[in-house]
Each structure stands twice: as C-alpha cells, then as structure tokens.
Amino acid sequence: QVQLVESGGGLVQAGGSLRLSCAASRTSFTIKDMGWYRQAPGKQRELVAVISRGGVTNFADSVKGRFTISRDNAKNTVSLQMNSLEPEDTAVYYCNAHDERGFNYWGQGTQVTVSS
C-alpha cells in the first residue's frame, strides 16, 4: 500500500503563488503517472495536472500557463508550482499516483484558498 503525503497548501491573495509537494511512501513497485486533482465545494473532483514517469505533462485548460508540475522519480515526489492564483483556484488539492500494477492512490488533500 502506497501512502501519499501532501504539503504546501494555505491562504494566498489573488495573483500570488503557492507550491504543493507530495511524497509517496517506499514501494517496490514502480510509480507511473503522478498528478494533482482538486475539488471545490459543490463541484466534482477535476484533474489539474499530471506528469508521466518520462516527464510528459498534461494540464487543465484553466491552469495552463500558470501552473507547472515536476517530479523526482528517484524520490517518488511530485510538485505543483501555482502562480498567478485566482479565487477560482480555491479548492482542496489531492495528490494522485498510479503504480505499475494499475493501483490508484490518493493523498489526504490540502486546502488552497485564494482571496480576492
């Protein structure tokens, strides 16, 4: 069982920046895609950004040009750099990872609040 531990959420003013980090516990299985999802009150969980083990990235249209995602395969960590934050980015952000068996893992979530 892989555990994902997130850090870096908080309160920031519009136009500000935050960096989220996520670390996967030690596992003998290869971690494939890692990424971030978010869920705002009353809305469904949505993809924010994902990065493959080879470094291929995909972003939600709403964050393109503002957010970047990176990972360290040796440490099984993934980070999300969020710039030019908007009130609409307010949500609980969840780290996600898949391993080579196809098992899917979620972090506990970290709150990001952007004030206007």
Image (tube, rainbow, N blue to C red):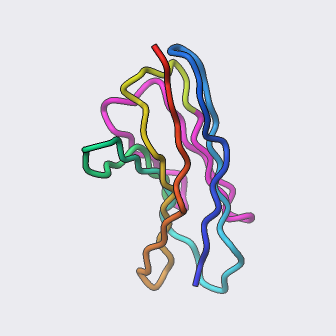
The residue positioned 51% from the left and 60% from the top of the image is: 34
The residue positioned 58% from the left and 85% from the top of the image is: 1
The residue positioned 52% from the left and 55% from the top of the image is: 109
Q: Quadrant of the C terminus?
A: top left
Q: Position of residue 8 (x, y in %)?
A: 66, 42
Q: Position of residue 70 (x, y in %)?
A: 60, 46
18 above or below 78? above
Query: Can you tell which quarter of the image residue 107 is in?
Result: bottom right
Q: Is residue 90 left or right of residue 61?
A: right
Q: Position of residue 6 (x, y in %)?
A: 63, 55
25 above or below 13? below
51 above or below 85? below
Q: Position of residue 59 (x, y in %)?
A: 38, 40
Q: Is residue 71 magenta?
A: yes
The range drawn in magenta is 53-81
The residue positioned 33% from the left and 39% from the top of the image is: 60
Which sits in the foreground, 62 or 12?
12
Which sits in the foreground, 108 or 26?
108
Q: Is residue 10 magenta?
A: no
